[in-house]
Structures are given as C-alpha cells and as structure tokens.
Image (cartoon, rainbow, N blue to C red):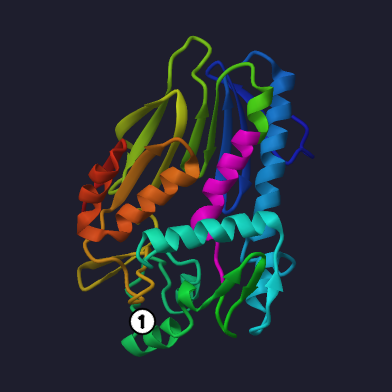
C-alpha cells in the first residue's frame, strides 16, 4: 500500500475496505466487489468529499465559512448555496424540535467539559452562556445571516450525517454492487451484498462500549444513525450527565436514554430522529413510536 495515500485499502472477509479519518471519526467504506480499481476510485471519492465537508464546516478551523460567520461581530454575512441548504435544514430542525435542536448552542462547551470527571458548571456560568444562545435571535433570510456579537454556529450535530449522504450521492452512479458507508457509526447502505444478503450492522451496548453488541440491524438500503452518551459524560454524586444539552436550560436532558439508534431513508433523517428522541428525555420511545420508524432505544 502506498504510504502517501490519504486512505488505506485492503481486502478483508471478501470485501474491499477503505479507511480514513475525518470529522474526528474513523471512516470506512465497505465494498462487496472483486474490482480493486473500482474500490480505489470510490474510496478516493469518499475521502475527498468527507475532507471537503470537514474543511468547509468545521468550527475548529480559521479559514472557512463557519469561522467567518462566528467572527462577524454582528455584521451580516452572505453564504453560498450549500451553506444555505444546511442552515435551512438546521432551521427546520429547530422548529420541529420546539427549539431544542439549536445550532447556536455549541457555546455551551465553554462551561461543560465532558471528560469523565465530576466538574459541573455553576448556574451562574450556564446562565451567562445562555444569553448567547437562540436560533430565534438569528436573522436568516435568503443567503444573508446576521447574529449578535458573541453568538456562534456549530454544525457538528448534522455535519457527519450530511457527509454520509453526500458521499452516497456521489458514488451511487458508479456502483456495480452493494456498498456500506460508515462514518463513526453513522451509516448508509447502497444496495445489498453480491449474494443478495443485507449488511449486518452491530449495535454496541452503551454500557460496555466497543465489541459488546446487543443487537443487529439488517440493512440493504437506507441509513442508520445513533445518538447517545456512551463516550461523553460526567458523573457527580452518583448522577450521570450526558453530553446532549438542552439549549433552553443549558443542562443535560433529564431522563434521556443512554442510546437511540434509528433507521431511515437518509442519514440526515436518521440522525434527526435519533437526536430528537434523546431531546425528548423520558418521552423518547413514545416519540419514536409515533414516527413509525425502526429503532432501538436503550434507557438509563
């Protein structure tokens, strides 16, 4: 394997498996094909698109549209069509969730640090940050966005799912057989395996973590996304605080499930449903049942 490649490609269990890192996640493309050249081509497309989206929308960079928006100091910013598409989607999620899905809430990271410690921020510290949160405060019309100075956007809640769907869109016309895209547990299947069998996706136990599966999801076409607090949490006085925060209070969602996995036609839809379920707290299962979707919900 050429060490200069930005990804690895190897034969494993009768599949070509491409691997790379993007968006702070391990990414895999599983291809049920004997054609190594095609496998190389598709993995290269996937890696380039994932890295492009990361570069464009990561809040950790100082050379992209998100940085420009966040450092605008109250001045209006005109955005391109792709950014406008994601902002429109985020606005729709905000409305559908009753304000609980809010891409301006990322500033809560200034007071919450989910590192497994027992450090809980004070009410005063949370209240101070809350004054800078609220999509309803954002002026968003056509391609022009204006935010109060000190507010920020964070597309981390939808970026990875968007990347999965974009990669699926780009490689689908080139496929000769089934492919499974897996970006850090957000997945999309584009057709079954060569023998007609579905892809078998292991769902891990949120209590035990990696290599401890509690269920299998069979998927020939469609997407799977999972939300939960298996890896990012705090424990204080015996209470567990998950990393998914309520932007209206600044605190973790009370009585939220440990993990929710949903199946939908696209990864963005699956991610929206799993996140919305977590945001419903104790009402997660009722919400998912009302949506008439396939799901797995692991409660505390």
236 lies above or below 27: below
At a point 57% along the width and 36% down the height, the residue shown is 28
Residue 175 placement (x, y as % from top left): 64, 21
At a point 36% along the width and 81% down the height, the residue shown is 121
Viewer-proximal residue, 90 or 53?
90
Looking at the image, residue 208 sits to the left or right of residue 46; the answer is left
* 83 part of magenta stretch: no
Which quadrant is home to the N terminus? top right
Viewer-proximal residue, 95 or 5?
95
Which quadrant is home to the C terminus? bottom left
168 lies above or below 57: above
- Residue 227 in sight here: no
Q: Which residue is mark 1?
A: 121
At a point 50% along the width and 29% down the height, the residue shown is 189
* 164 part of magenta stretch: yes
Residue 91 placement (x, y as % from top left): 49, 62
Residue range corresponding to the magenta coloring? 153-169
């Amino acid at each position: 394997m050429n060490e200069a490649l930005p990804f690895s490609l190897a034969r494993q269990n009768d599949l070509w498996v491409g691997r790379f890192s993007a968006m702070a996640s391990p990414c895999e493309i599983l291809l049920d094909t004997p054609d190594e050249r095609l496998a190389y081509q598709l993995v290269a497309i996937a890696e380039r698109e994932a890295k492009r989206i990361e570069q464009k929308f990561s809040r950790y960079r100082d050379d992209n549209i998100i940085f420009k928006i966040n450092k605008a100091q109250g001045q209006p910013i005109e955005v391109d069509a792709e950014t406008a598409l994601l902002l429109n989607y985020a606005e729709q999620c905000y409305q559908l969730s009753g304000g609980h899905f809010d891409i301006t809430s990322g500033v809560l990271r200034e007071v919450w640090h989910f590192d497994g410690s027992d450090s809980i921020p004070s009410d005063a510290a949370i209240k101070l940050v809350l004054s800078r949160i609220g999509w309803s405060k954002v002026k968003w019309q056509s391609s022009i966005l204006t935010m109060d100075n000190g507010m920020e956007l964070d597309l981390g809640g939808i970026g990875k799912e968007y990347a999965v769907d974009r990669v699926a869109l780009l490689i689908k016309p080139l496929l000769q057989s089934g492919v499974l895209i897996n970006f850090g547990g957000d997945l999309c299947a584009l057709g079954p395996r060569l023998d007609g069998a579905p892809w078998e996706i292991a769902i891990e136990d949120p209590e035990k973590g990696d290599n401890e599966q509690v269920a299998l999801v069979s998927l020939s076409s469609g997407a799977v996304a999972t939300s939960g607090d298996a890896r990012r949490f705090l424990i204080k006085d015996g209470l567990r605080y998950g990393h998914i925060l309520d932007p209206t209070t600044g605190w973790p969602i009370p009585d939220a499930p440990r993990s929710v996995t949903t199946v939908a036609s696209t990864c963005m839809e699956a991610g929206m449903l799993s996140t919305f379920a977590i945001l419903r707290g104790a009402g997660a299962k009722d919400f998912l049942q009302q949506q008439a979707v396939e799901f797995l919900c692991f409660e505390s």
